[in-house]
Amino acid sequence: MVIVLNRSIRESDKAAIRSFLEGRGFRVREIVGEEETILGAVGLVPIDFREVEVLPGVDRVIPISKPYKLASREFKKSDTVVQVGPVRIGGQRIAVIAGPCAVESAEQIRETARIARQSGAVMLRGGAFKPRTSPYSFQGLGEEGLKLLREAGRAEGLPVVSEIVSADFAERMAEYVDMFQIGTRNMQNFDLLKRVGAIAKPVLLKRGLAATVEDWLMAAEYLLAHGTDEVILCERGIRTFETYTRNTLDISAIPVVKKLSHLPVIVDPSHATGIRDKVPPLALAAIAAGADGLLVEIHPRPEEAASDGPQSLYPEQFEKLMRDIDVLAPVVGKEIARLPEPEAIALRSGSESEGDVAFQGERGAFSEIAVHRYFERSGVRAVPCKRFRDVFEAVLSGGVRHGVIPIENSLAGSIHENYDLLIQYPDIRIIGEQKIRIIHNLIGFPGVGVDALKRIYSHPQGLAQCAQFLESYPAIEGVPYYDTAASVAHVARSKRPEWAAIASAEAAATYGLAILKAGIETNPRNYTRFFVIARAEEPVPADANMASVVFATRDKPGALFGCLQVLADESLNMHKLESRPILGRPWEYMFYVDVEIPEDRRRFERAAERLSAETESFRILGRYRAHSLGT
Ligand code: PEP
Ligand code: MN
């Protein structure tokens, strides 16, 4: 802490302050400035600052270290990812928890769970003990409600969260819920925080109605200090003078808390606004501001809800919100967390050779980022390869179980070499898809100004995508290099501060250089779609909703029309159609089609059978789970 002394302080008072602090175990240093004299007191000593503030000769006390420790970023630099059953909250996923305000009946909670699951929620919420403002309002079904919530969650494979209001019930409640919720009104119920913390289950901690960020983090500190490592903070609106909405959602708390703490932050737009039509815009704002997820009230028939009907979303509103989040997520470098089908979980994390995934490029390449994004839950090792063909070879030979290859960029179009390789390797299948936003950064030696640069290296695509930035510095020469990440390695090796490169932030970190300017791409809507490939004997993911197929038509009028007619007959939604010359057969073409696999998979299978009969050649390149169907 820093103690600012009165200008006219007597030497005897100063000595008394010093000996008071030293007596408490602080090390004290005096700094005499032109304007003020201050004492710096250092040491891990618990103290009430007011004890120092009241000493004669003290003008004011400025605390330096934060009162919370375990919840602070200083204590843990990396983001905490809280694991609730198969669901991970924090990191690069957006987890959406949905359900009714209160569990009302077995039918109501089962129906809501189904709606939540179908639209992509990963956890089910539902109050059983409702802390209502009025004693005459519906108070919840109590323990019976918890049973119904657990059953509904199990039926849909959704972990459940519910609010606890009494410390004495903590052990009993732990049998029903996968995560405790501490409500707004109980944020500073310290006995409750201690008892719930000691159970060491995940806890969702709502912000108090009139709690500062520091009060809130101190409440989290109680939970952490008593045993749980898994705390999720939930901003749900605070009291302000504004009465138009139920509360005022403090969006700014999200980046503030994320800087101060390593804990995930989610947002409850339902209790924040209290009005249904305000929920989706604020939910999207929260995601844009960096929230790790949402807690949203939904109800199959909100007008019949026993509590909070006016703020509960209709099923179709929730579905629309989830689709909008799906589109927004890549803009903030995230994606919606999904619950894979049980078979898909086994596929992604079960095998012993799961460890290795091949990608083309140097360390820090966008392909490597795609590897880690897709395999987030399994901690795989990314293996760099020189050429795209080497990725296919590594997978085919069994050297690695999976490979990740870029297939198209939203600005530059398809990467034809990889389409051709998919044809040339019939024993390789696409089993997954990953889209990432491409953010280009100017990377160089720390502290160098852009004006001091003479050369900027990057892949020609990287240079082209940052043309506007480069045009504004005509004196700097753009030098093409074979790979974006490799251009960073090249600059780092050169030790020439007048050189820089354009690549990912990860590449800057990998080669120990600094980001001189972030996000210099001309068009920020720059996404690359990657395919995850595996050997053909790998099972088709159980949650696949998209297929990529390729066929060559017979040489007759209307041949392509006939093929598309097959898709139309089965009402299959086509996403992409592209023609490519057939290698070695000039002026003959193959057609690549991405087509949605509907819930009734037989429609896709029938179409595939008919296409194989009607075309000269037909192949399914793979079936996989595609996200952002709407984009
Ligand atoms: C709830 O989520 O059910 C609830 C009562 O919220 P809050 O504690 O934020 O008012
Ligand atoms: Mn509610």
Image: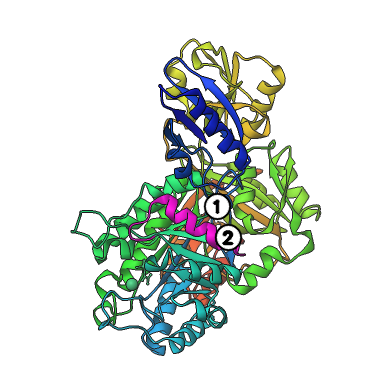
Residue 214 among magenta residues:
yes
Answer whether residue 570 is visible to the viewer in this image. no
| Image-based side of 136 in relation to 10, left or right | left
Q: Which residue is mark 1?
A: 71
Say if 267 sits above or below 100 in the image: above
Q: Position of residue 390 (x, y in %)?
A: 75, 43
Label 2 crowd (10 A; few <14 / some 14-19 / many >=20)? many
Say if 158 sits above or below 439 in the image: below
Q: Position of residue 367 (x, y in %)?
A: 62, 43
Answer whether residue 68 is visible to the viewer in this image. yes
Which image quadrant for residue 90?
Answer: bottom right
Q: Which mark is residue 224?
A: 2
Which image quadrant for residue 309?
Answer: bottom left
Toward the left, the furthest residue is: 244
Which residue shows up at 78% across the image and 59% down it?
Answer: 353
Kindly identify the amino acid type of the residue bearing the numbered disc 1. Answer: Ala
Q: Please identify the dominant SS of the magenta region.
A: helix
Which residue shows up at 44% across the image and 39% down it?
Answer: 53
SS assignment at label 2 = helix
Kindly identify the amino acid type of the residue bearing the numbered disc 2. Answer: Leu
Please report the bounds of the magenta region as a residue range: 208-228
Toward the front, the furthest residue is: 12
Say if 446 sits above or below 373 in the image: above
Q: Position of residue 45 (x, y in %)?
A: 60, 45
Distance between the alpha carbons at the discs numbered 1 and 2 = 7 Å
Q: Between disc 1 and disc 2, whose residue precedes?
A: 1
